[in-house]
Amino acid sequence: MIRSVGTMLMRNLTARLVILLMLALMLITGTTDYLRLSRERERLVNQAQQDLRIFAETLAVAVRQNIRRGRTTDELRELLDEILARPGLVAVAIFDPTGQVIAATIAPGTAEAAADEPVLQSLGTRRPVAAMVESGDTRILRHIQPFRWPGGKSAAIEVRHTLANAERDFRRAVQENIVSRLLVLAAFVLSIYALTRWNISRPIRSLIAGARAIGHGDLSQRIESARRDEIGQLAEEFNRMASNLQDANAELLRQAEERLRLEQEVQQAQKMATVGMLAAKVAHEIGTPLNVISGRAEVLSRTLAPERAERRHLDVIAGQIERITGIIRTLLDYTRPKRPNVRPEQLPPILKRVGALLADRGARRDVRIELELPPDLPAVLADPDQLQQLLLNLLLNAVDASPPGAVIRVTTGSGPQLPGEERAVVVRGKADRPCLEVHLLDSGKGMSAEELERAFEPFFSTKGGGKGTGLGLSIVEEIVRGHRGEIEIRSVPGRGTEAILRLPLAAAPGLPDAVPPAEAAGHA
């Protein structure tokens, strides 16, 4: 609907422009032509009057000579009949000094000759008199020329000439001019219409399409125009507006992401406070009974011989007590993370130690860990103990998620390496300096977008009941934030998970070689 309205408006704009130009041209050229033709008609009338005057003077001389020779009235009438054959003449009359018509020749449809006021005026003043009279739908020129009558008195001859032919020629000229003008106007209108559609309508349609695209949210829309006129300036202003909108939208998105990150950090801090209170209470309420149970089990263990069957039960009790104590210690470490003591560290030795720690667990599940690291890997700024704990948690999750016979790859590079288009992604932390990207890829069942969104929540686990505390990734996030790094997890359900760890480089151009421990801890 918007497109049809825009097209209609554009067509109306072109039509209005063409119609206005046509009307203006018709008004100007019509007025000019009418004035020109009117002047031409007046010139022809003046020329006819001059010709009629000369003819009347010549005729008066001839009539005077014929009267002196004694020509009769009939002979004079015959002379006038011959004269009336001249084109345009409609009446010739001869008046004696008393104003009586002595001879006249009148064309059909023309008023009879009579001694009216112009004739009497010419006889009285002995001067020629010219006049123009209306006769039906045409005009007639009259010229009354006095001449000397025998005896010294003044007689007159009247000649009438019709302007019907001139009027007819004038009307024909007007009609021909109108037709030719209409043809010229038609050609002009077609030219203006074509030029308008090409030079104005087309760029305006581009502007409409660009505005429609921006209205639909495509802020990358730009209009290509090499023109330097007003339309070109309008296109430049449109592109500048679109660029400003795009920058403002990007800034709004950045601010929204920053607010979301801050909200997540506040929520994480609140969760940690809650977990800290819970851990302290659990440690206080469970620690003392566990110590009593552990002490009694140890006393009983010393009193029993090694070959007694009851000794095996006591060992199980001691092992479970140690497991509960480890869980409580993990809670306390999570809620009270220590400040990282960062220094330049090489990543391969730490990864090899972690691989050795997980060798037995991997062997039991028939899962291998392969390190695909280049020999010239740069050093990173890290606390080796915390970095080892971070990598241990990530690789432990990968081992537990991998099926028998799987291979866990640890490599470096730029950009994600997990294949598949339906990836769910979650990012924690924010790297604010050049980093080394470490990729840990497994081929497990993966996680859905909903599971991945909750992956860093405390006590959330996809391993099932009794197989994990759900604090591994929460501890990973705290360690990454403490190192001013970033952790990104990508997962494809049914195909595996990729953890991308970004750790700050120890030697980055334009940056100090190390981050002070206090500053790193303050970022945690």
Image: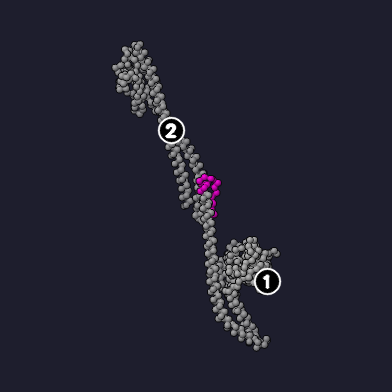
In x, y percent, where is residue 141? 36, 24
Magenta part of the chain: 218-234
Residue in front for this viewpoint, 271 or 317: 271
472 over 173 or under it: above or below: below
Q: Residue at x 46, y 37 (%)?
A: 185
Q: What element does badge 2 sit on?
A: helix
Q: Label 1 amino acid?
A: Arg
Q: Residues within 10 Å of mark 2 (few under 14, many from 20)?
A: some
**Main SS class of the magenta portion in the image:** loop
Q: Earlier in the sequence, mark 2 or mark 1?
A: 2
Q: Residue at x 48, y 51 (%)?
A: 3
Q: Is residue 236 left or right of residue 45?
A: right
Is-magenta flag for residue 311?
no
Q: Residue at x 51, y 54 (%)?
A: 214
In x, y percent, where is residue 518? 60, 69
Q: Please, which residue is most extreme toward the bottom here?
A: 303
In x, y percent, where is residue 418? 62, 63
Is-magenta flag for residue 225?
yes
User: According to the image, label 1 marks what residue?
Assistant: 353
Disc on res. 33: 2
Q: Residues within 10 Å of mark 1 (few under 14, many from 20)?
A: few
Q: Residue at x 39, y 17 (%)?
A: 58
